[in-house]
Amino acid sequence: MSSDVLQKARDFEAQYGPHIPDRERPAFHATPTIGWMNDPNGFSFYKGECHLFYQYHPYSNVWGPMHWGHLKTRDFLRWERLPAALAPDQDYDASGCFSGGAAELPDGRQLLMYTGVRRSHNADGFLQDVQTQCVAVGDGVNYEKWGGNPVLDAKDLPEGGSTIDFRDPKIWRDKDGTFYAVIGNRTADGSGSILMYRSRDGFKWEFVRTLDRCCNQYGKMWECPDFFPLDGKQVLLTSPQDMKPVGLEFHAGNGTLCLIGDYDTEKGFTRQSAQAIDYGLDFYAPQTLEAPDGRRIMIAWMQNWDTVNAKPHHCRWFGQMSLPRELSVRDGRLIQNPVRELEAYRVRRVVHQNIPVCGEINLPGVQGRVLDMTVTVRPTGPERYRWFRIRVAKDGEHETIIRYRPDQGTVKLDRIRSGLPRDIVHTRSFLVRPRDGEIKLRIVLDRYSLEVFVNDGEQAASAVIYTRQETDAITFEAGGSAMVDVEKFDLDFVGQEA
């Protein structure tokens, strides 16, 4: 049943969304129908199709009362727009329908679980947000909120848990039919934890355990958790607020954290390693699904809370999702690569092999703004080159740079001259595994974004760029002498079936 608030949002997006031409959007990254987008929600398969919901404010290009927007796809790349799924229209979610997950019920309906936010006065008379967990049930297009909401509230928290920071349930249904959810929470020490709950039917939930706690080591509040088995290990993803910088691994501000370890139903989760998920400038709140073929696929909001005011003038949409990525664990690290479906859209292959680079060069046929390009760089002899730069989206005024320093073992992403209208954080460096001066960089460009995958997915780095679309030159430059192989494909989505 559609409330007046939800119907208003649907009418608005139906009226104004179609007026945004495709050329003003990325070719294959998910964007909102109109207005504002942030965290991915409910990333899941339902009735043979992949559904992606998202935090949504249709009425402006800035954050506002949160709705759930809705997209679906058959190949993770071509997105069909569906009407908004949820709106803040009940007492328990009047201040927003925050992030959550989705799963299929035994009767074939789709279950959405989300954080409902309402405002109340605290003991000092100040307004504060109170967060509870709520559910809605539907058919893949229309959803009805359950009459027994909220399904989890203050009484379901462990001792010391916060009702103000209690959000972002990620749910799944286990092989035995039991539903599980992991939810972010703030503990008495002011930092974050991840709580696990279970349910037999998806509506009545009970607390199981605290999976892991921050203890003020990795930021503060832990948002947007995900928890899944992968290649014999157990992976816990979360997005901490207020991270402190740690070398080149973690940077200040809202970050991402991957914890890899083991899980035992009696002992719980045992953490063995910690790493950043993405090493670029724009990546937050990732969520995963298990595809029908067994792959673990991840998508994230390709934006940064500290840079959301640096947007183009008069933009009618703001916020996009990352390219979905296939995940694996190798040598104790999370490995990420673009979904293999991207290869179906490759056209016009250009190959250059064993090209010596000394100074700056361009290569015939290597340019563009919607492309998939792999660059392998290696020394020409016993002496290593000092640095190697790839400039993309380049003209006399603009460029975005990927730089590798073999002596330091670092890759640097630099978008200072990429067209963003504010003086914000524009560079980021990260360590890569040494390979005797050789490095392999897969670069995916899609009009308003750049994603770099290093050494077959050992690291990934994402950044939004706003360089005008006509700016499409690509050059290669070495400090010293280097040898380069380049394989470049244009990506053509025009005329392809969704």
Image (cartoon, rainbow, N blue to C red):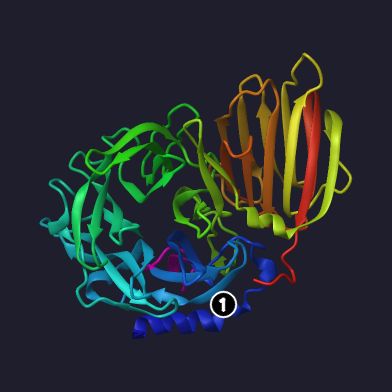
Q: Relative to 46, is 232 above or below? A: above
Q: How many marks?
A: 1
Residue shown at 64% from the left, 62% from the top? 28
SS of the residue under disc 1: helix
Tell me the residue that label 1 is attached to: 17
Image coords of residue 380 (percent x, y)? 81, 21
Image coords of residue 63 (percent x, y)? 42, 63
Report the amino acid beneath label 1. Gly
Residue shown at 50% from the left, 50% from the top? 307
Q: Relative to 153, is 428 above or below? A: above
Residue shown at 25% from the left, 67% from the top? 201
The image quadrant of residue 221 is top left
Q: Is residue 162 in view from this perspective?
A: no
In the rendered structure, the answer to whether residue 279 lies left or right of residue 476 reads left
Image coords of residue 353 (percent x, y)? 85, 35
Image coords of residue 358 (percent x, y)? 84, 26
In the rendered structure, the answer to whether residue 140 lies left or right of residue 131 reads right
Quadrant of the drawing holding the C terminus: bottom right
Answer few, some or many: residues within 10 Å of disc 1's Cα (few below 14, many 20 plus, some between 14 and 19): some
Q: Residue furthest front?
A: 176
Q: Is residue 358 in view from this perspective?
A: yes
User: Where does the magenta region start and end?
Assistant: 52-66
